[in-house]
Amino acid sequence: MTDVTIGEGVISIGTSAFGECASLTSIIIPDSVTSIEPYAFSYCTSLSSVTIGNSVSTIGLLTFLNCTSLTSIIIPDSVASIGNGAFMLCSSLTDVYYSGSKSDWAAISIGSNNTCLTSATIHYGVEEPEHTYGSPVWTWASNYSSATAKFTCIDGDDTQIVTATVTYEVTTAATYTAAGTGAYTATVTFNGKTYTDTKTVTIPMLVLTAPTITSLYNSTSGVSVGWGAVDGATEYIVWRLNNSSGKWEKCATTTGTTYLSTSPVSGTTYYYAIEAVNGEVTSGRGTQRYILYMATPKVSLENTTSGIKVSWNSVAGATSGYQVYRRTADTDYELLKQVSTSTTSYTDTTAEAGVRYYYIVRSVRGSARSAYASQYITRLTTPTNISVSNTKSGVQVTWSAVTGATSYQVWRKLSGSSSWSKVGTTTDTSYTSTGVTSGKTYVFTVKAVYNSSVSTYNTTGKTIMRLAEPTITLENLVGGLTASWNAVDGAEGYKLYRRSETGSYVLIADLGADELSYTDKAAKAGIVFYYRVQAYNGSYTSSWTSQFNRRIGHTTLTLTKNSSGVVLTWTESGGCTGYYIYRMNEDGSYTRIKTITSSDTLTWTDTDVDLTPGNSYTYYIRGYNGSSLGSYTPKTILIEA
């Protein structure tokens, strides 16, 4: 069923008569029908056109509910009421053809939820007589946010009220020195003409709000003040009241919202207030806040023998004393001690070696606390087991390693002096101090170091007289092996030691300061001996370097002549493996002219000579064994006829 024409004689279409007839597309209702009951055509989703007869006076509740295809409907001027939701969800309805006039339409009682009907275009079948309207009468809301225009027909039989569109525009902006103006304009369109009405309002002069202090605290450099920004402020005046003087003073003018007051006196209460400024306009001082200023103690740290000593300056007004806090890299600050106002140091005896500690000190007066500046130091114990000894190049200082130390400073002074000088830095646990003078007495001490942390030091130190190392030489002479050495400044004597290749050193001579050589007559021929000499002064001794030589016996030389040349004959030299033969040159120097490689050979003839009578030749012979040479005595022969 798609198209339905209801026959004459039907006077009412009952409730849900055609409800949910989804195929119904159009319907014509005859003039005999006077009422259409609720839901009569509800959910007829294909219904697109309806013609209602001229006798219908009532269209019931939800009659055309959800007729989504309905685009137009013809309603007679006999209709007096349309029930709630009669055209609810008729989303396609665009045109209503009404046989009466506009005023007739307005008289119909249309229930709620009929927006689809009232929003459609109404086509009236009867034209109303023309009206002539005068100028509108405007009605404004008290805040000018809305307005209406009332139009009245000049013959008084019709009145129309139209809601206006209201716009606002600032015509003169308000400043901090003068009020501004603004204009509200209401606009309506009626009978093809546009009407406007304007209301001018005064914009109050801008007012600077007094700033509110949001932060006030003691800092390391003074009192820090902060406040919230104020709209329109170009700068701010910081005021301070000294509680003792009772007078406000201007501290500064700034464009920012923070200020550091660097001139307060520790132990004094100050009041602060902020004033906003824009040109010559000011807000006046805002709400004041006060603070008891406590200066920040200046902290220094040092390692001592008993722990880490924390020191600080006395702070005026710190009537409740000082609080000392400590932390490590892995812990938070903890209060170690609160000390009295007369105390300006504290030694932390619980600090562990090698650990870096951070310390702060706060001055205290009642509930007031100063700011603080953190200082750190690594706990380093005093180096111990310091020893000193003379070496060839200087004085060697040694000590035990300190936990946590990465380097060490070596300090030196002359004995009897109070002035220490740092002579070197090393990462080892020994250091050789050069530039020391033999015969002078020095005191040495050591400090442990980790970055900027330095330990204390042994103030007594270790004392030593610098004694240079004697340089020893060895030589085979007629009487034995002779050791010689240079004089050492400061020495009061020398000790000479000897050992064999397999033995230990034995003291063989204790000599005076002026005795610089010694002949070891007990040295046996053919044996290698090691010698060392030490300069000494009391308990102070020099270093030494050993030298060795083999004892080679003395050779006695005899010279004769034969037809071939000069014949050299000698006695056997104990401990040698051969002999060197030397002959004097015309300039007095000697040249080795022959090497005898067997110790058993005890004669040799020099044929490279001129046996002319009157000529003379001088020779000497030395036994040798490796680098060791025996002693000798030169002999001369005169060639005779």
Image: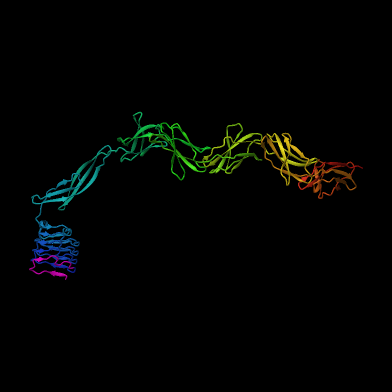
| Drawn side of residue 534 relative to residue 175, left or right | right
Q: Main secondary structure of the magenta part?
A: loop
Q: Nearer the viewer, residue 477 or 233?
A: 477
Residue found 43% across the figure and 38% down from its top: 372
Give the colour scheme shown.
rainbow
| Drawn side of residue 299 relative to residue 488, left or right | left
x and y percentages locating residue 351 in the rendered image: 49, 41
Image: 286 above or below 76: above
Query: Is 315 a magenta residue?
Result: no
| Drawn side of residue 641 relative to residue 506, left or right | right
Asked which quadrant contains residue 90, the reply is: bottom left
Which residue in the rendered view is the most extreme toward the front?
Answer: 350
Q: Nearer the viewer, residue 157 or 309?
A: 309
The stretch of residues the image draws in magenta is 1-21
Asked which quadrant contains residue 425, the reply is: top right
x and y percentages locating residue 148 in the rendered image: 16, 48
Q: Nearer the viewer, residue 18 or 258?
A: 18
x and y percentages locating residue 569 in the rendered image: 86, 46
Image: 265 above or below 82: above
**Count of numbered tags:** 0
